[in-house]
Image (spheres, rainbow, N blue to C red):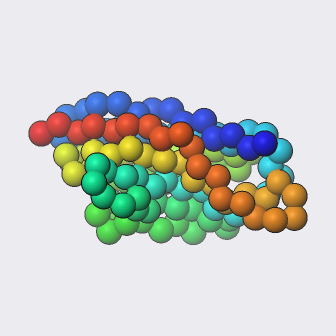
Amino acid sequence: QVQLVESGGGSVQAGGSLRLSCAASGRIFSINAMGWYRQAPGKQRELVAIIISGGSTNYADSVKGRFTISRDNAKNAVYLQMDNLKPEDTALYYCYVRGKPNSVWYDYWGQGTQITVSS
């Protein structure tokens, strides 16, 4: 059983910063990708940022230059530094991991952490 534990959500004024953390625990011996998705009310879940094995990253256009994703392979953890936050960043943020507990790759999701940015 693999679990993703998220932390770091909260409320902040526009222009402020927050840092999200997510750690994967349980029986997982290989991770291919770790990242963050978000879902605002009435909208579909969308990719925010992702980092794959080897270190390459991909960001949504809306967060490029403001958000930075990083990964600690030794801790099976992923982080999202969010700077210059805007009201449109308000959403439920989900940690995502693509990992292999056996011979098959699986997609794992965190429970979600709320980010609210006020103007």
Residue beneath the point at 87% across and 58% down: 102
Choose top left, top right, bottom left or bottom right for residue 115.
top left
- Image coordinates for residue 32, horizontal then vertical, percent: 70, 63
Q: Going by the image, does 66 lie left or right of 7?
A: left
The answer to whether residue 57 is visible is yes
Choose top left, top right, bottom left or bottom right for residue 98.
bottom right
Q: Going by the image, does 62 lie left or right of 27?
A: left
- Image coordinates for residue 41, horizontal then vertical, percent: 28, 49
Q: Going by the image, does 19 lie left or right of 104?
A: left
Residue beneath the point at 28% across and 54% down: 42
Residue beneath the point at 73% across and 39% down: 25
Residue 64's place in the image compared with 2, above or below, is: below
- Image coordinates for residue 53, horizontal then vertical, percent: 68, 65
Choose top left, top right, bottom left or bottom right for residue 19.
top left
The answer to whether residue 31 is visible is no
Query: Residue furthest toward the right?
Result: 102
Residue 2's place in the image compared with 66, above or below, is: above
The N terminus - image quarter: top right
The C terminus - image quarter: top left
Residue 12's place in the image compared with 33, above or below, is: above
- Image coordinates for residue 96, horizontal then vertical, percent: 57, 53
Q: Which one is nearer the viewer's eye here, 64 or 94?
A: 94
